[in-house]
Image: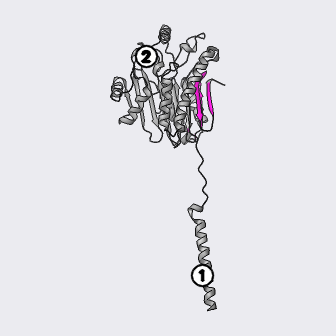
Amino acid sequence: MRKLFFKTIVVLLLISSVNSCKKELEPNNITKSKPAEIPFALVIHGGAGTIKKANMTVEQETAYTKKLQEALDTGYRILENGGTAIEAVQKTINVMENSPLFNAGKGAVFNSLGKQEMDASIMDGKTLNSGAVAGVSLIKNPINAAILVKDSTRHVMLSGKGAEEFAKQFNLVFEDESYFYTEKRMNQLKKAQKKEKVVLDYTSLNNSSLIDNHKYGTVGCVAIDKDHNIAAGTSTGGMTNKKFGRIGDSPIIGAGTYANNQTCGVSATGTGEYFIRTLAAHQVSNLVQYKNLNLKEALKQVVHVEIDTLGGDGGLIALDKNGNIAWDFNTEGMYRGYKKSTGENVIEIYNKN
């Protein structure tokens, strides 16, 4: 009897020990390390070119700085409230398209016939789905039309009258020619035609010209949201005095715009023909993915080696899958800025080198 009692005690102790071990091994009792939090963020540009502090008045510099900050704040609020990167890019670019300070939307420059021909594109880094419009004249916000192409067609790019007819079906806002017209921009076209020049971004016609007389800058934005999805978009009026029908890099996926959650998002500004030839935006992604370069190294390779070698001017902004931000350009300035959930808020205009 005594032996049976002791055996029972031993069995109960063993059962208790086993149950205790099981409890320790249960998932709820295992301390899990939280994955590193990727900051949500966005980076923008408002064009590159001969942007010298000596040619900029205090009032002009203040105006550009305020508008860049407004654009950043608009996109940041969307990201902060859980909105998508696509929406943040769209609304951020809308702010710049609605301003006469930049060469996009309201500020679009004149082609050789005295008309506006605007281009825009947007790309979703999660799905690689993309949309673009080229050579549109009366759409108030071309980036909105690009999103419609992405979401409502099987195509990537629509151009000219076809793109405008498509946009009308979705009740996009159109403006008449007077909305896009200013005397200063017309004078700029006349000066360019007199000198037989095609004027890019903020390249001044002479050293005494004020920046305010040369409102050219292509606009772009790249964002990463709380779900770690990346999006990139670009919108432009092209070059002053460009041949009618000319299309640059801005609406071309892989040249002026690219986004991929596996690598980064990129938006370009500059001499579009050179960004097309080098597939500049996609090349940055390739260098990150296949050469294991960081963003700064990849941008330097594309801007200062590949585009420089061909004789092109301009710059790139980029944001990678970890929320890192970088930019590079080979001109004397580029309107640019970024804002991150870490608290960083930066706006720059001139070349610091």
Q: Which quadrant of the rendered structure holds the N terminus? A: bottom right
| Main SS class of the magenta portion in the image | strand
In the displayed structure, would residue 257 be above or below residue 6? above
Residue lying furthest right in this view? 353
Q: In which image quadrant can residue 316 be found?
A: top right
Q: Which mark is residue 252?
A: none
Which of these two is toward me, 110 or 290?
Answer: 110
Q: Which residue is the extreme one toward the bottom? A: 1
- Above or below 19: residue 201: above
* Quadrant of residue 314 within the rendered picture: top right
Is residue 9 in view from this perspective? yes
Q: Residue at x 40, y 17 (%)?
A: 244
Residue range (magenta) = 320-348
State whether residue 252 appears in this view.
Answer: no
**What residue is at 58 percent from the left and 12 percent from the top?**
210
Q: Badges 1 and 2: C-beta atoms under 8 Å apart?
A: no
From the image, tell me which residue sits under label 2: 179
Q: Which amino acid does label 1 sit on?
A: Val
Q: Residue at x 53, y 37 (%)?
A: 79
**Percent of width and height locating residue 7:** 61, 86
Residue 292 placement (x, y as % from top left): 58, 42
Q: What residue type is labelled 2?
A: Tyr
